[in-house]
Amino acid sequence: MAMFWEELRILTKYALPVFGTHLLEYSLVIVSVISIGHLSTNALAAVSLGSMTASVSGFSVLQGFSSALDTMLPSAWTSPHPQYVGLWTQRMTVVMSVSLIPMFLIWWNAETILLFLRQEPEVAHLASTYLRWVSLGLPAYAFNCISRYLHPFIRCRLFAVPTRIIFIVAPLNAVLNYLLVWGPKPFRLGFIGAPLATAISFNLVSVMSIIYGIFFVDRTAWYPLSRRMFTSLGVLVQLGLSGVGQTASEWWAWELIGLAASLLGPVALATQSVLLVSASTTFQAPFALGVATSVRIGNLLGERKAKRAGIAAKTSIIMALVLSMVSSAMFLIFRNVWAYLFNDDPEVVGLVASILPLVALFQVFDGNAAVTAGILRARGKQFLGALLNLSAYYIIGIPFGIWLAFSWDMKLHGLWYGLTISLVYCAVLGTIICLRSDWDHEVDKVMDRLKAEDKAPLYEAEHVEILQNICRAQEILGKYENVKVDAEEGEQNK
């Protein structure tokens, strides 16, 4: 119990800044949905479709790949070789840069793809316009996913640094959205103002992260640039693809539900947009706890503290349950007025109010699934998490939801019943897997990985650095010998 209370304090300390960071980051998207949603129902449907496409083909993939660093970096930082943090971050930069190419191709040809999927022409055109303007911030978004790992102090000790950066940018994003969508004529751009504001905000976060990294982060975890950054990419690609399967499969499930909702008409799509944004906002709390848990367990494994890692895992599962109950209560209390935050259409408001009790139940299992996913990432089990999510959503939840929505005419309610059932399955199995973990074995795996890295061949830049260090050492020793000789001669003369 003593360890439980200690881990509760540590995980809370880690999770709060991460929650602030992710919530404020997500606000960059939420503000654009709110600002566009009051233009018209079609505009709200278009921004929902555009953000859905961006999530499926871009944001979710980038976050999935970057989640591989949850496995590699925390244990490297607490090991005898913290410089491997910089090496693995450089390797991830190479992988992410290549992944941006197909994303740009999809986003700039989105209208043709959406029309092929039988979306309404006006909604498809607006959604593709949204994607083209948001793509100006896509490289910055990729960099921001990595920048959280640029230095272990950001990730493991100074969690608050990314929070401080986004705390500055988020209000600026709100002001930009107002000026570019609703502001006076010299600034007002209408629909395109919101995605442009989002792209500008992504780039501001990147610039501020670079400034912080250059001037305020020490070089403990820095690794010299060399050809070694192009080695062992297969490990990151394997973990990254599994991370995409684990992280992005859930995003894709939501977006497939959104695509199914779009077939039910603009009102259903607008309602789905409200529900998706709402559930995603409350999801940031357990997701932040999952990130904190992944880092904490990774640190403990690097320190060879197997028993404490297991206690940290159990503590996080209990914390997730408490957080989920709070968000569930909020949705139940404010269900009749919640939709007015996004849209004034009475049909949308009524439909949102009727589905929110189901969303409240959904919260309990969604929070648990987020934390167990973090535990699996700490263990390097992204592939297992991907299998769990894929079976939960694509074998059980989505087919059942679509069957209820269209065959039983339950419409949007049926889709959410399917999502809830998939989360029940995912949460229960994920908890069982995490509680049965062999933490001593996980410590052994981390030690084996670090030993393998030690045996890797050195490259030119590393040889140069070693030779420079030898030269400096020889120079110091030479000065010491001269002083010693002078002292002996002085003694003899005396």
Image (cartoon, rainbow, N blue to C red):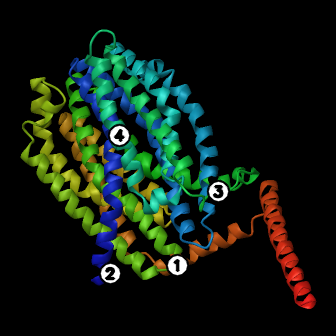
- The answer to whether 494 is drawn above or below residue 12 in the figure is below
Density class for disc 2 (Cα within 10 Å; few <14, some 14-19, many ≥20) is few
Question: Foreground residue, 480 or 353?
Answer: 480
Question: Foreground residue, 75 or 122?
Answer: 75
> What is the CA distance from the residue labelled 1 to the residue labelled 3?
25 Å
Residue at the front extreme, as displayed: 494
User: Mark 2 falls on what kind of element?
Assistant: helix
Residue 265 visible, this angle? no
- The answer to whether 212 is drawn above or below residue 429 in the figure is above
Rendered residue at 44%/34% (across/down):
204
- Residue position for label 2: 3
> What is the CA distance from the residue labelled 4 to the residue labelled 3?
30 Å
302 displayed left or right of 130: right
> What is the CA distance from the residue labelled 1 to the residue labelled 2?
21 Å
| Mark 4–mark 2 CB contact (< 8 Å) | no
- Residue position for label 3: 87
Rendered residue at 36%/37% (across/down):
169
- Residue position for label 4: 168
> What is the CA distance from the residue labelled 1 to the residue labelled 4?
43 Å
Hey, what amino acid is under mark 3? Leu
Specify the quadrant of the image occupied by residue 469: bottom right
User: Mark 3 falls on what kind of element?
Assistant: helix
Density class for disc 3 (Cα within 10 Å; few <14, some 14-19, many ≥20) is many
